[in-house]
Amino acid sequence: MSSTLFIFYSIGISATLLISWVVYFFLRQGRRELPHWFFWACIAASGYIFLAQILKYAALNMYVDFAHWLQVLRNISIKGLPEILTHEFIFSGTTNYFSVHFVPLIYALALPFKLISRPETLIILNVLLMFSSIIPLYGLAFNIKKNKYFTLFITVLFLWYPTFQYITLYEFEMLRFSIPILLWMLYFWEKKNIGLYFLFTLLAVLAREEVGLTIAMFGVYLLWKERQRKVGITTIILGLGSFLVITQWIMPAFRSGDFVHVGAYWFSQFGDTSIGILKGIITHPLLLIKTVFNPIKLANIGMLFLPLLFLPFLAPAVLISIIASIGIGLLSGAPEHTSYMLYYISPSVPFIFYALLKAWPKITARFNARAVMSAMLAGIIISNIFFGPSPISLQFWSKNLRPAPFRTQNFHWSAYRVTDHQRKVEEFVHLIPDEAIVSAEQFLAPRLFKKKGMMVFPQLETDDGKYKAEYVFIDKTNPVKTGAVAVPGSWDGLRQNPQFYYDWVEKDFLSWELIKAEDGYFLYRRK
C-alpha cells in the first residue's frame, strides 16, 4: 500500500469511528428516533445502483467478465449448453463453462434472457436478485426484535453496506447470489423450517462450487454453538461432500483433457494440484504465515467490519461461518481475493449481518439502543463517503482519489458519462459477422457477446493454433488498457506501450486489412 493510500485509510477509519462515537455520546441519554421517511429515502436512494450499471455498460466501462456471462447465457438460450469459447482460448478444454466454475443456477437466468437477449436484461436481473436479499434479512431482523423501526434500520445498513454495493455494481458473477440464498437459508433456520432450510442450503451449493465450504462451516457453528447435533452434522456433510463431489468428479467430467481447477493458479506457491497445495500448506509453515498475514489482506478483512463498527464480533461464534471464504482469500497469492470491493467474499456477507443480529441483544443490554442505531447509521454514511462507490463518496467526485488501485474499478462520475464516441461503437460491431472470432480490447468485449468467440487483445490465436481471430477491434482513445493473460507481458504492456501491440496488426499487411477507422476505433479483418 502506498503512503498516500495509508494516510487516506487512516483518516477514513478514524473519522468513521470517531464520528460514530460522538453521535452515540451525545444521543445516549435521549429517546428520539429518526423518522421512518428517512429510512425509506435511504432505501430508495440505493436504487442508484441500477442506473449506474446501465450507464457503465453504455459508457463502455464494463469489461470481459460481463461479456463472458452474456455469451454463456446466449449459448444456453440457443443450444441449451453453457458453452463459451472465450475460456477455451485461454485454457484448452474449457468450452463448457461448468468445467471452470460449477454454476447451474445460471439456467434460472437463461429463460428471461432468451425472451429478451440484451445486456440490460442481465443488469435488471442482477439488481433485482441482489436487492431481494432484504426480504429474508427483514424477516431475520423481525425475528430478533419485532419492531418495524429496527427492521428498517437493518435494511438501510445492508443496502448501504459498501461491500454489498461494490459486489452488486461489479459487472457480473454468480457467486454474488450466494448472498440472498444464504440469507433465506438463515431465515428458515431461525424459523425452524428444516425442510426449506435444507432446500436453500442445496441452492447455495449450486451458486458456485466453493460455497459448499461455507455451508460446512455453518454446520460447525450449529454443531458447536447451537448444540444441533443432527442438523449440524448433516449440514457439514452436505457442504463438504458437495464441494468434493463437484470439484473432484462433476467439474472434471465437463472438461475435455486433464482437469486442473482454474483457481489453482492463485495457490501455486504451495503446489500445483489440490493434494499438492494441501501438502504445501502443511509442510511450509513460514510460507503459510507470510501468505496469510499479508497486511493488505488483513486490512481488507477489517474493512468488512468497519461500517458496522465491528459490532458483529460480539457474536464471534457466528463468524466461524466466514472462515471458509475468508480463508480461501488469505491462502491465495492474490490480495484481491480478500478485497472488500470484490465479489470473492460474497458468502461471508450474510453471516456478518447474521452475527450483528445475534449480537444485538448483547448490544442493547449494555448500551442505549437508539443511540447505537444512530451511531451505526453515522458509521455507514461516513464509511460510504470515504470508501464506498456511491454518489455520496469522495471517489465519485474526485477522479484522482481511488480507495484501491484496480484498473477496471472506476466509480468516478465520468465512468457513467455516455458520449457520441461510445455510441459509435455499434457501427463497428455491425460490420463483424456473428460467426466470427474477434480479438478486442477488454472494454469492447461486452458489445461482442453475439459473436462466435472473443479473444482479449493482443491475443490473436490460441497456443495450439486451433483458433485464430478473424477480426481485430481496438480503440486507441481509451486509456483503460489491460492485456491478455494468454500473451505474456501484455497485462501491463498494453497500457505502457499500446502501439507496440497495435503494430502486430497494423504492420502485418500480409495478414490484416483495415475495414473501418473512425474516431479512434479501428477494425481489421484477417485476409
Image (cartoon, helix red, strand yellow):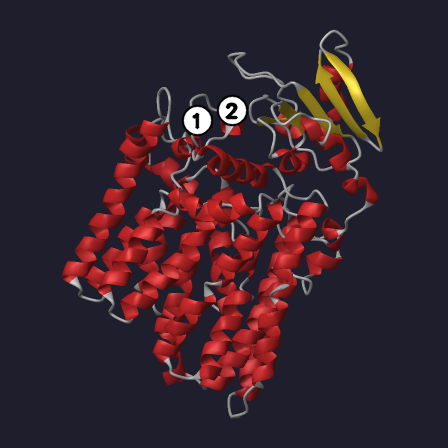
Mark 2 neighbour density, 10 Å: few (under 14) some (14–19) many (20 or more): some
Give how far across and how far down residue 362 sits, in percent. Answer: 35, 78
The secondary element bearing badge 1 is classed as: loop
* In this rendering, position of residue 247 left or right of residue 42: left
Q: Residue furthest top?
A: 510
Point out residue 141 in the picture as x, y percentages from the top left corner. Answer: 40, 75
Q: Amino acid at mark 2?
A: Ile
The residue type indicated by label 1 comes to Thr
Q: Nearer the viewer, residue 437 or 44?
A: 437
Identity of the residue drawn at 60% across and 80% down: 38
* Viewer-nearest residue: 502 or 275: 502
In the rendered image, the vertical position of residue 237 relative to residue 464, given as above or below: below
Task: Say whether residue 288 is visible.
Answer: yes
Q: Taking 330 as reference, is 14 above or below it? A: below
- The residue that label 1 is drawn on is 94
Q: Are marks 1 and 2 in contact (CB under 8 Å)?
A: yes
> Residue 116 got which mark?
none
Residue that carries the numbered disc 2 in the rendered image: 90
| Residue 278 seen from this side | no
Q: Which x, y percent locates residue 209?
A: 35, 42
